[in-house]
Image (cartoon, rainbow, N blue to C red):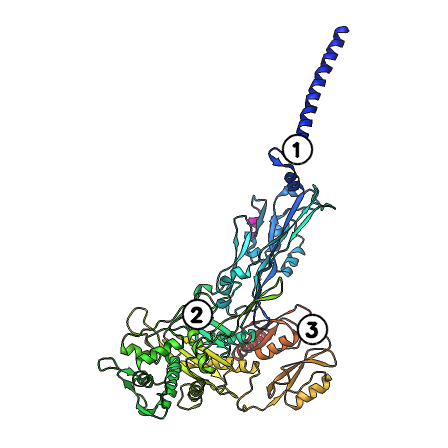
Amino acid sequence: MIKKQRNINAGAVILFIIFSLLFFVLLFRFMSIQVTGEAGGQPVAAKAQSKYEREKTLEARRGTIYDRNGEVIAEDANSYKLVAILDEELTTDDEHPRHVVNPEQTAAKLAGLIDMEESEIYSKLSSDLKQVEFGTAGRDLTLQKKKEIEDLKLPGISFIQDTKRFYPNGLFASHLIGYVEKQEKEDGGTETVGMLGLEQSLNDLLTGSNGHFSYEADLWGYLLPNGDEVIEPAKNGQDVYLTLDKSIQIFLEDAMSKVDEKYSPKKMIGIVADPKTGDILAMAQRPSFHPKTREGIEDTWRNLAVEDSYEPGSTMKVFTLASAIEEGVFNKNNTYQSGSYKVTERSPAIPDHNGGRGWGEITYLEGVQRSSNVAFAKIVNEQLGYETFREYLTKFGFDQPTGIDLPNETSGLIKYDWPLEKASIGFGQGSAFTPIQQMQAATAVAGDGSMKKPHVISKVVDPNSGKTVQKTSPENVGTPISDATAKEVRNILETVVSSENGTGYGRFNIDGYEVAGKTGTAQIPNPEGGGYLTGHSNYVFSFLGMAPADDPELVMYVAVQQPDIDESTNGAEPVAEIFKPVMQSSLQYLNIEPTEQPKAKSSQAPDLIGMPVKEAEKKLTEQDLEPVIIGDGKTVEGQFPGQTSSMLEGEKVILKTNGKTIVPDMTGWSLRDVLKFTKAANLKLNTVGNGYVMKQNLSSGSVLAEGDYLIVEFETPLEQYEREKMAKEQVEEEEEVVTD
């Protein structure tokens, strides 16, 4: 018994010694941490903070691109990415599964809502991965599409919120604006990067910087009541306002689409500018592409207006004429022998465009009107002189880029070694220039002789502060000619359109406005080497025009390369089918007063603001104008166009009342009338097709809700006829079946 007691005492002593040692080790450890503030070589405070602190990234918004009037051209919008959870371990309650339970049924239901085959969806849902995505078919989903999928209540189907770049106008100055792509970063995240046009060249400016929100939380992630919070807000990218006018751009895109469909040319370029400021109001080309789908991008990556130079043809005669008038050597009443002309005895003869036949002995004025190559070769060689003419090429900016705020601008190429080359530039052959160089030079002729630098960026605004950080002002880049010379040139070019001898007569005339301009038919160098292409359509047909001729508000350049035309069709036809409707619609849209009364009866719209609706309708009807009421109120609070506008007989006037905005039936409306309505109702517009309204997404008679989008489908009279004809034939066939 005594021996057993001794063993217990010895064991107790050993345990006491062990616990005493542990106590002193822990005490030493505690004191060490208290003194050094470190554990395991790492700061204790940092380890605690990393355990209990949470951090979230605050996404920055990419800057919005607007037109001159604040209409959105490109903006970031919320989108959603579809994901499927396949990991069964995430399901803790069998009655509420959190993974895909039935891949076959899930695939069948999803196939009806995303652009992916059912078999391909099933293959993804049957993989061994814990989570899968659905590629492009499952990205950039709208809120509406997300709700439709959520309504299916499919287990394991979830979404990740994202942003996408939204281009609400579709095919709209696409090479100028560009597009973006999402690229993966080294940390596994993604970033939006501009890939073309302004989206690329202004990428650093448009890209913001992400912020973050950090906070202290408990083990379960809940915010600690007395925890520290640190918020560093995101800095959104800067907003860019362009000089483009959405309405004028739509006029141009619409006209070019019609010509593209009708004539299938190899290339087309159209530019509209304000000659008083250098503002580019519209710029379009074909081939083009849709910035969302990229459809068509493979046809050309270049902005043809600034990245392509080519022989301009007879539009160059505008500047040869201006140089000669400025030097005082041009006398429009002097005569010369047309047909052909040799610059030197050994040089080949320069022929007039009618096969060298000419028109006999004619005045130089008629030579300009008929676009005689001989007249302009003689002006350069015999009147101006080569050295003086070369100086004017520099004065008009043809030997250097314009410096427009667009990427990848190229310069022209002046070949000025031999007498034939020097004389040939006078009528636009042998040397190459860009369309934007011609537009810049044209501002001197359209204005007071001062040449304005073209630009597309109006201002840059920091959305974080609301301050304008960059503003573009009109820039005079030279005065190659005087105001008097500019007026004389316009007077002569006006006869190119108004005189029966003029190459623009009957094609480029616009009712109510005098147009000054010059046609062009440029030869195309043979790509296989040696000479030029031959054939009726193997030319670049163009027109450089301005209106009103006495004081131009707009200058426009159109070029159409190799349209599909037969021998009976003049190459100027497709050019005119772009220039004329765009220039006319733009002048009317800008409320430019006509210089002469059009044949149709016109009147000034009365001031109807504040007037009872019934009385306003009566006044408009008395003036042979068509009132369109878009509200259920009793009083007119807005009218479009306004009372200062000159209206043609039968033209629609949109009256907005003080009640709810009601959607009208727009069937048969023109694009111009639709634009009036969208302006009155403050709607965003997307158009499909050309011609007149055939279909609208907003039902007539319905009440407009805030944020509604108007999508309108147009069709030409020919398309309407064919559609109605097919419908009639189908009805007749059905009736025959019933009879049989």
Q: Is residue 382 magenta?
A: no
Q: Secondary structure at mark 1?
A: helix
Residue at point 69% right, 42% down? 92
Please provide the residue range marked out in magenta.
121-126
Residue at the spot of label 3: 702
Three-letter residue code for mark 1: Val
Who is closer to the viewer here, 638 or 231? 231
Disc 2 from disc 1: Cα separation: 70 Å
Q: Nearer the viewer, residue 229 or 549?
A: 229
The answer for how far apart the CA atoms under marks 1 and 3 are is 76 Å
Identify the mark nearer the N-term, 1 or 3: 1
Disc 3 is placed on an element classified as loop
Q: Is residue 670 visible?
A: no
Verify CB contact (< 8 Å) between mark 2 and mark 1: no
Q: Which kind of residue does numbered mark 2 sit on?
A: Val
Callout 2 touching callout 3 (CB < 8 Å): no
**Residue 125 belongs to the span the image colors magenta:** yes
The mark that comes first in sequence, 2 or 1, is: 1
Q: Secondary structure at mark 2?
A: helix
What residue is disc 1 on?
35
Quadrant showing the N terminus: top right
Percent x, y of residue 602: 59, 90
Q: From the viewer's side, name the closer residue of 139 and 252.
A: 252
Q: Are marks 1 and 3 in contact (CB under 8 Å)?
A: no
* In this rendering, position of residue 104 left or right of residue 346: right
Pinpoint residue 69: horizontal percent, then vertical percent: 59, 73
Mark 1: few, some, or many residues within 10 Å (few <14, many ≥20)? Answer: few
The amino acid beneath tag 3 is Ser
Q: Which mark is residue 306?
A: 2
Sooner in the amino-acid sequence: mark 2 or mark 3: 2
